[in-house]
Amino acid sequence: MTSLWFESVLLPGGWARRVRITALGGRIAQILVDVDPTDADERHAIGIPGLPNLHSHAFQRGIAGLTERRGPEGDSFWTWRELMYRFVEHIDPEDVEAITALAYAEMLEGGFTQVGEFHYLHHDRGGVPFADPGELAARVAAAAAATGIGLTLLPVLYAHAGFGGTEPGKRQLRFINDRDRYAAIVESARRTVRQLPGGVVGIAPHSLRAVTPEELVWLVELGRGGVVHIHIAEQTKEVNDCLAWSGQRPVQWLAGHVALDERWCLVHATHITQEESRAITSSGAVVGLCPITEANLGDGIFPVPEFLAAGGRIGIGSDSNVLIDPAEELRTLEYSQRLARQARNVLAAQPGQSTGRALFDASMTGGSQVLRSPAGLMEGESLDLVTLNSEQPTLYQRSGDELLDSWIFGGSRVVDCVWRAGEKVVTGGRHRRREVIVSRFKRTLRRLLVS
């Protein structure tokens, strides 16, 4: 049994003082408020629920910082993608596991406790299938097991290079599947991930340009009512290509051809109209925002205030993992809106409301919905909990929502300890297996980048 006592904890009903949380078998057995600590309690000052990271391509952590040189004709998402493809050509299963483990350890150190892995790297070099179609999915699951992070694995169907069933390019062959091979990957993933505490398997059409309408219908049926994640309307080129193909914009087309509901996560959805925004909101789907990656790639800015005001739901993801830090994701989300609107505290909807609390609550609610992870610290749920170091100067003399505001806007590296499914995986801001994970990562990158 785990017994923790806190001076202050953020519970679903708000901040509570003098709280004991006990857990058994990784799940919260009891939460008591306004109690004294006992000798058996591990004592901490500040506790908050772990955050969901709803969109990750973990292997891309290996190229963080290596795409920041200007090309001969300017740069965009599409030129970045070519550099990413070049890296993908060289990595093997061991590399995938090593890089993913580092990314997941860093997520836990930052306060993420569940990750939605949008997994589209499926085959060996040259697109040759592995004997086990789920080989690389199993490597992702192994990294999750080694680090302790909660995993929502989203095997991706990537069948075409563009709208209308365009043939894939040579550099996309490691991603490409037909229906039979994809179904085999999903079944393999289900067998593997069910062994992980809190493990979930969903499905993911890569994008509307990567699947045909018929494949999309088949894919949703294959999902068996589970979560569905899709890249959509991330780039203006994508919007224009969709218009040329169908006469409709991406979200407009999707809303008119599938039954959007609370299972769906529309990743990015950056370039949408008011009509498309209303369609998402009325469906209950979540928009997955990845502010650091969207800024890094120059994608654009999603209209968050209007979307939230209409009842829309959002979550945050680390996407390309160029920088892994949930506080930085939330800060970038708010600051992008401030720059666009020349105003402050844009995403705090009501006078006097804490911006940090508004960001935290929105990302917790939306992310947990589409990862099927705990939505807070509640009896019966997995003990996924983060403590903040009250000795850090940025948190000194703060209380309540001021703690979230100061963490997000004043100093993101204040995470002290992290529990996931009742296991203490981070202490003093460091993952318990950090040295081993980093050493393996270094060996991997030394071989990949020298070769």
Image: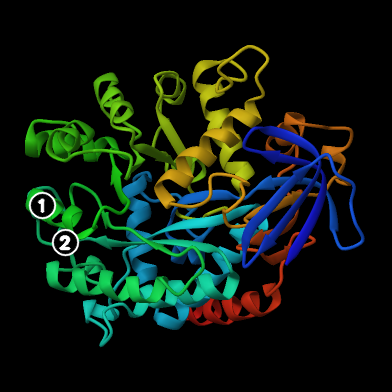
The residue beneath circle 2 is 159
**Residue found 68% across the figure and 32% down from its top:** 14
Q: Which one is earlier in the sequence, the residue at label 1 or at label 2?
A: 2
Is residue 51 left or right of 404 when viewed as pictured?
A: left
**Residue found 7% across the figure and 49% down from its top:** 164
Residue 444, horizontal then vertical, whole percent: 53, 80
Rendered-image quadrant of the N terminus: bottom right
In the depicted structure, whether residue 270 falls above or below residue 109 = above
Is residue 411 left or right of 158 when viewed as pictured?
A: right
**Residue found 20% across the figure and 67% down from its top:** 176
**How dense is the environment of label 1, judged by Cα within 10 Å: few (below 14), some, or many (20 and up)?**
some
**How dense is the environment of label 2, judged by Cα within 10 Å: few (below 14), some, or many (20 and up)?**
many
Quarter residue 239 falls in? top left
Q: Residue furthest bottom?
A: 131
Element at label 1: loop
Q: Residue furthest right?
A: 39
The residue beneath circle 1 is 212
Residue 177, horizontal then vertical, whole percent: 18, 68
Count of numbered labels shown in the rendering: 2
Distance from Cα at disc 1 to Cα at disc 2: 8 Å
Quarter residue 299 falls in? top left
The answer to whether mark 1 and mark 2 are in CB contact below 8 A is: yes
Q: Is residue 398 visible?
A: yes
Is 134 in front, or is 382? Answer: 382
Q: How is the image coloured?
A: rainbow
Rendered-image quadrant of the C terminus: bottom left
Residue 7, horizontal then vertical, whole percent: 85, 43
Disc 1 marks which amino acid? Thr
Disc 2 marks which amino acid? Ala
